Image: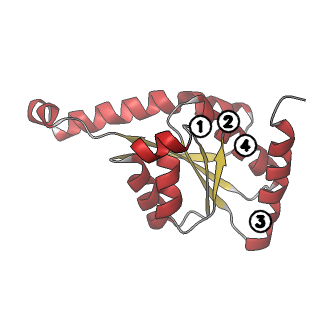
Amino acid sequence: MPCGAGSTAISSAADQHFLKATGMRTILIPCDGSDNALRAVRYAVSLAKELSDVQLELLNVQDPLPQKVHAALSEQEIARWQAGEADLVLQPARQILDAEEVQYQVRSRVGAPANEIARHVHETQCDAIIMGTRGLGPVANLMIGSVATKVIHLVEVPVTLIK
């Protein structure tokens, strides 16, 4: 059995029990296209397949473009470019979800990732978050912070981190 495989099964059972007990049904999956984010998508798929009435929302947050770009392009051109970038980043996650025949919605936002994830949760009333973490370690977290750590502090819903 690969390292960590057993802990995923335990976590999956715990998450299933929690979601059933609390009636939570909308799970947000922030996705930056990283390997850890795609593992979070696969984990969410396993929950959605076992709990048929779970709704998955896939979210990508694009960084704002520099002010120079805003001076050179119209807001429509910028919005089209950012939407295209979000589509590219989310393509592997969408392929996983489509292959597993799991229904989902796709969203994208622009801004600081942790703040936009928290704003999305608040605005859409998502019940839980499943997201990847890069596992930078405590020293790196202290120096530069991590999106996952910030999200945990900004939201009031359960967050499951996938390494």
Distance from disc 1 to disc 3, alpha carbons, whole Å, reads 22 Å
Disc 1 marks which amino acid?
Answer: Ala
CB-based contact (under 8 Å), mark 3 and mark 2 = no
Q: Nearer the viewer, residue 78 or 8?
A: 8
Disc with the residue nearer the chain's start (4 vs 3):
3
Res 43 label = 4
Q: Within 10 Å of the Cα at label 3, are there few (<14), some (14-19), or many (20+) other Cα atoms?
A: few
**Distance between the Cα atoms at labels 3 and 2?**
20 Å
Q: Using the numbered discs, state the Cα–Cα distance from disc 1 to disc 4 in whole angstroms.
A: 10 Å
| Residue 108 lies in quadrant | top left
Quadrant where the N terminus is found in the figure: top right
Q: Identify which amino acid the numbered label 3 is placed on.
A: Phe
Q: Which residue is mark 1?
A: 37
Residue 30 rendering spot, x and y as whole percentages: 53, 45
Residue with the mark numbered 2: 39
Q: Residue at x 79, y 71 (%)?
A: 21
Residues marked 2 and 4 touching at CB (< 8 Å): yes
